[in-house]
Amino acid sequence: MSGAPQPAIILVRPQLGENIGKAARAMLNFGLTDLRLVSPRDGWPNPSAGPAASGADVVLERARVFESVAEAAADCAHVYATTVRKRGVTKPVITPEIAARAIHSETGGSAILFGPERSGLETDDVAVARTIITVPINPAFGSLNLAQAVILVAYEWSKHEALASPPITDLGAPASQEELDGMIAQLDAMLVDAGYFFPPDRTPVVRRTLRTLLTKPGWNAQEVRTVRGVLSALTKDRPRGQARESKASSS
Amino acid sequence: MSGAPQPAIILVRPQLGENIGKAARAMLNFGLTDLRLVSPRDGWPNPSAGPAASGADVVLERARVFESVAEAAADCAHVYATTVRKRGVTKPVITPEIAARAIHSETGGSAILFGPERSGLETDDVAVARTIITVPINPAFGSLNLAQAVILVAYEWSKHEALASPPITDLGAPASQEELDGMIAQLDAMLVDAGYFFPPDRTPVVRRTLRTLLTKPGWNAQEVRTVRGVLSALTKDRPRGQARESKASSS
């Protein structure tokens, strides 16, 4: 058993209660119990989930519901997004096998996002994650359902449970999603203030680019605080006498 | 791709057509196409199989039916039996991972037996096999269904195939030292301007902290340019009418 806590399985906008039950069953087979649901389509609890869980009721009973991916992953330092296709987001793409190794060796909690049955994760969901997990699959026939994706990830994770944890180099766990989001919001407000987002129709893409860029470092909590201090310093009125081209009216 | 032929998946006395379809889907996801059925309960073809296969029709069309395990595996040099529990048969028990490696390294064809949904393989079926495959599973909750057992075995097998190579995402090499230094210098000038470095005797330490933090991401050249654009935007005079209240959105 490694020192890392077990990863949270986050189902994002799952459609059928039956599939939530199947995912719970897949999880418990490999010892995972932390199930989180983001805006399940048919509400929660869902009477179809229990029968499909085939006895994994403990997972369903402990399941927590959130309104957004960010809230669901707020306490997690490492967020992984599972996708089958390549997305317009530039992030590292790894296999479940590599992800399992990473989750066991890293400090701080992990979360793994799974998208809705039909469509998979949206680009904005993927943007929250630092890393993408893709199951290498038959290029001529890729048809993994939700519970199958969950079981493959859970299975890989379980392989490391009996093994000794490797020596850990403590770079400090990446800050939690909540801390990261706070920093991004602070910068965003400053950029709105500065008129950076122009033209308006480009704004969502630019925001995503910034989020990707700021998620990439994996800054720890102290580093995020430092960045926020830098941003605060840049927001304050400039000290007298050090003005470059700043106008009196803006001080 | 190894030289060994792909293993045959032999479903022994499967009960539901739906589960045969799901097994076919699980197989094709990982490139397996040789499905063999021993005495399917409801005969063959089975109208429930097609819809459950979700497009893996080619596997169902090629499926062959046999009357006994021995006939189904007649052309195979290596027969593996999947079981969840220990049986009254003394044979080596290995994981799907080890089995996949063996199948790829051995000469001669392989077959993997999967038992009926309810009961699993009988002792006489297991007796045909030389080796037992058992998925290491939560001892407190072992509840793998037929298609899940097939998918885990197929997944492990596929890891040694060409399709198992993970997709490569080009994140771009980190920016050159010169580009990085240019970005750091730009921020540094802004922070001097803002009176951030105080007290003066702490300045070298703070500068080193910032450099470490900005080196950590490994931002590529484009990302460094984006950051410099952000910094430039924050240096400019604020556009008229955009007050600080817009910060309300930050946490």
Image: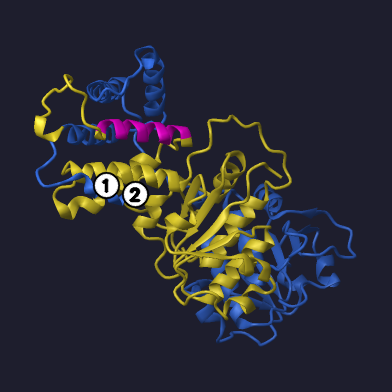
Chain colours: A yellow, B blue
Label 2 element class: loop
Residue pointed to by mark 2: A89
Chain at tag 1: B
Residue B244 at x, y = what percent?
21, 44
Give yes or no for residue B111 being in the magenta stretch.
Answer: no
Whether residue B31 can be seen here? no
Q: Secondary structure at mark 1?
A: helix
Residue highlighted by disc 1: B247
Q: Is residue B138 above or below residue A179?
A: below
Q: The residue under label 1 is which amino acid type?
A: Lys
- At horizontal 42% and vertical 60% (from top left) the residue drawn is A68
Percent coordinates x, y for residue B66 in the rendering? 70, 78
x and y percentages locating residue B104 in the rendered image:
64, 50
In this image, A19 relative to A86: left or right? right
Across and down, in percent, residue A156 comes to: 62, 52
Task: From this view, report whether residue B83 is shown above or below residue A210.
Answer: below
Front position among marks 1 and 2: 1
Please identify the quadrant where the C terminus of chain A is shown: top left
**Whole-Å distance between the Cαs marked 1 and 2?**
27 Å
Chain that bears disc 2: A
Is residue B69 positioned above or below A184 on the image? below
Residue range (magenta) = A222-234
Taking the spot 13% from the left edge, 35% from the top edge, the residue there is A250
